[in-house]
Structure formats: structure tokens, C-alpha cells
């Protein structure tokens, strides 16, 4: 079959694999994009860390937290170009959606995401018509808790994080400092879940299958595949689970150790409930929402 150049480029952008490898993968899978990604991973050409798709989308991330830090909202609004993303009218319109999102208590799903059709986009579409670019709300989220909600927006408004802590000591100064450190961790390291027990079994099994196929391709004995796959899963959890990650400010510690130390210092329970991390252009169907 004929493989379009744009599909090859899209696969290359998402996996980091070479052009010829991407073209071969699409040929081998009859143009099935997800199957091609899996094919490249099984061949050891693409890694799990590169699966977060890179997109040409531009825009900005808007983050809000209420005055008592019990709720926060985050919205991604897209444009086609960076020039428009910095347009004063676009910025004002996007910021307004952040304010609206803060009124959506109780409307977020279990994944802490708000359906984008809950927003009135009349003003955005009118602006789209005036400036001649497609604009959209890509995604939005809302988190509330009885503890402490904090936020972080990376300079340039291309990346934002909100996090919720709970527990008896969640509003202590120690916990507030921890929340700040964790938002920086999430921004830098891009976890998808809070902890290992939140990773769906289907995701774990899919990873194990890929690792086993990789090992078979390398000629490893069948009886060793489960053990090797388990070891690779531990590394996988270190990449995608916040508490399992290496702490970016001290490579000798994991995030769970930092949380444990904060609990000790505060003299009471502090638990990471949920977080949302939005980066412009990363809008994909596999966003893990509140446990990202």
C-alpha cells in the first residue's frame, strides 16, 4: 500500500524513530498508526518515554487556584500559530476560560477532566473568524479537596500543573512547600499517575508484552522473559508514576521519600491525591487526567 509522507512524519514525531523505520513500520502494519508505534517499540526503535505525541498545535495553558487553595482549574486553549497565541485578544479570551473553569465544581469526571463542550466558545469562535485561525479549547480540568491545592505555570504559559494534597497536615507550611516542589517535579518529569497502583492493568500487560517481544527478538530464553519484563516494568513505573520517580532536585531520593520526609517533619499525614499536567500540543486520547 502507499504510505503518505505526512503519516511517516507524524509517526517520526511521536516515536523519535528514523524516517525509513517509520515508513517500514506503517507498511508492515497496513497503515495502522497505533500498531506501527507498537511495532517500533517491539523492535526497540522507539521508547515508551517518546510516546507522548509532539504536535504542531500552539496556544497557552491557563491555571487558576481559589483563595483558600481548596480548588484549582487548568485549561488548554489552542491556536494554529505562536504569533496568534501571543495576541492580546487571544490571551484575554483564554484567561477568561480559566475563570469559567473555576465555576465548574462537581462537573469534572473521575479523571478530574471537564468536558470541553461545557464551555461557551462563542467569543473564541468570533475571534477565530477575525484572526483567520482555527482555535479551540483542547481540554480542561478541575480539582478540589479538603486539604491543599497548589499550582505552577512554566514561563511562557505553555505548561501548567495543579496538584491536590490531603491529610491532617496537608495545610501545614511543610505541606505547602512540598506541594510547590511536587508541581516543579511534575512539570519537569511528566508523570502520568500518582502511584503504581493507579496504572490500569491493561497498560501494564501491554507493556509486558512489548518487553517480552523485545527480548525474544534479542534471542533471550523464553523462561527468562517474565523476570526481565518485571525488571523493565519497575523502570517503566519510575517514568510514569510520580511517587516512583527519581526526585529531580536530589537523584539519591525518590519522590515517595520526599513525601515521607515531609510527613515526618509536619508530624501528620500528607497524601498526594491527584494532579493534572497540561502542556500545549500534548493533547491526546491517552491523557490520564487526574492521575497523570
Image: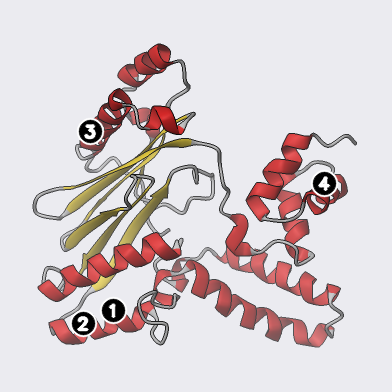
Q: Earlier in the sequence, mark 2 or mark 4?
A: 4
Q: Earlier in the sequence, mark 3 or mark 2?
A: 3
Total labels: the figure holds 4
Mark 4 against mark 3, which lies toward the viewer? 4
Mark 2 against mark 4, which lies toward the viewer? 4
Relative depth, front residue between 243 and 209 = 243
Where residue 90 appears, x then y in whole percent?
A: 32, 26
Q: Residues within 10 Å of mark 3 (few under 14, many from 20)?
A: some
Q: Residues within 10 Å of mark 2 (few under 14, many from 20)?
A: many
**In the drawing, what numbered circle is on residue 263?**
2
Q: Residue at x 38, y 77 (%)?
A: 247
Q: Is residue 135 above or below residue 262?
A: above
Q: Calculate the distance from the C-alpha at mark 3 to the C-alpha at mark 1.
A: 32 Å
Q: Residue at x 70, y 46 (%)?
A: 11
**In the drawing, what numbered circle is on residue 100?**
3
Asked if residue 37 lies left or right of residue 104, the reply is right
Asked if residue 251 lies left or right of residue 13, the reply is left
> Dots 2 and 4: beta carbons under 8 Å?
no
Quadrant of image for the C terminus: bottom left
Q: Residues within 10 Å of mark 4 (few under 14, many from 20)?
A: many
Q: In this figure, which residue is indicated by the disc labeled 1?
A: 259
SS at mark 4 in the image: helix
Where residue 121 appears, x then y in whole percent?
A: 34, 22
Q: In this figure, which residue is indicated by the disc labeled 4?
A: 23
SS at mark 3 in the image: helix
Relative depth, front residue between 84 and 195 = 84
> Dots 2 and 1: beta carbons under 8 Å?
yes
Q: Is residue 124 above or below residue 221?
A: above
Q: Residue at x 56, y 53 (%)?
A: 52
- In this rendering, does residue 187 appear at all? yes
Amino acid at each position: 500500500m502507499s504510505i503518505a509522507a505526512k503519516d511517516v512524519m507524524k509517526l517520526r514525531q511521536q516515536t523519535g524513530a528514523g524516517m525509513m523505520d517509520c515508513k517500514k513500520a506503517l507498511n508492515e502494519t497496513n497503515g495502522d498508526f497505533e500498531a506501527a508505534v507498537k511495532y517500533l517499540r517491539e523492535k526497540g526503535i522507539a521508547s515508551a518515554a517518546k510516546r507522548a505525541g509532539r504536535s504542531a498545535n500552539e496556544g497557552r495553558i491557563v491555571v487558576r487556584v481559589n483563595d483558600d487553595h481548596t480548588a484549582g482549574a487548568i485549561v488548554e486553549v489552542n491556536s494554529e500559530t505562536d504569533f496568534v497565541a501571543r495576541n492580546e485578544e487571544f490571551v484575554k479570551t483564554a484567561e477568561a476560560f480559566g475563570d469559567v473553569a473555576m465555576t465548574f465544581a462537581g462537573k469534572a469526571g473521575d479523571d478530574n477532566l471537564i468536558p470541553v463542550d461545557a464551555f461557551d466558545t462563542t467569543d473564541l469562535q468570533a475571534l477565530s473568524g477575525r484572526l483567520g485561525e482555527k482555535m479551540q479549547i483542547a481540554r480542561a480540568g478541575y480539582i478540589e479537596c479538603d486539604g491543599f491545592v497548589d499550582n505552577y505555570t512554566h514561563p511562557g504559559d505553555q505548561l501548567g500543573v495543579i496538584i491536590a494534597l490531603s491529610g491532617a497536615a496537608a495545610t501545614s507550611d511543610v505541606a505547602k512547600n512540598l506541594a510547590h516542589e511536587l508541581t516543579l517535579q511534575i512539570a519537569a518529569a511528566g508523570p502520568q499517575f500518582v502511584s503504581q497502583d493507579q496504572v490500569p492493568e491493561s497498560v501494564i500487560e501491554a507493556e509486558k508484552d512489548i518487553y517480552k517481544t523485545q527480548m525474544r527478538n534479542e534471542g533471550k530464553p523464553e523462561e527468562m522473559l517474565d523476570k526481565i519484563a518485571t525488571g523493565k516494568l519497575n523502570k517503566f513505573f519510575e517514568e510514569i508514576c510520580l511517587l516512583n520517580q527519581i526526585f529531580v532536585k536530589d537523584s539519591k531520593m525518590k519522590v515517595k521519600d520526599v513525601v515521607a520526609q515531609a510527613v515526618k517533619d509536619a508530624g501528620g499525614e500528607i497524601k498526594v491525591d491527584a494532579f493534572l499536567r497540561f502542556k500545549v500540543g500534548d493533547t491526546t486520547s491517552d491523557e490520564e487526567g487526574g492521575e497523570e
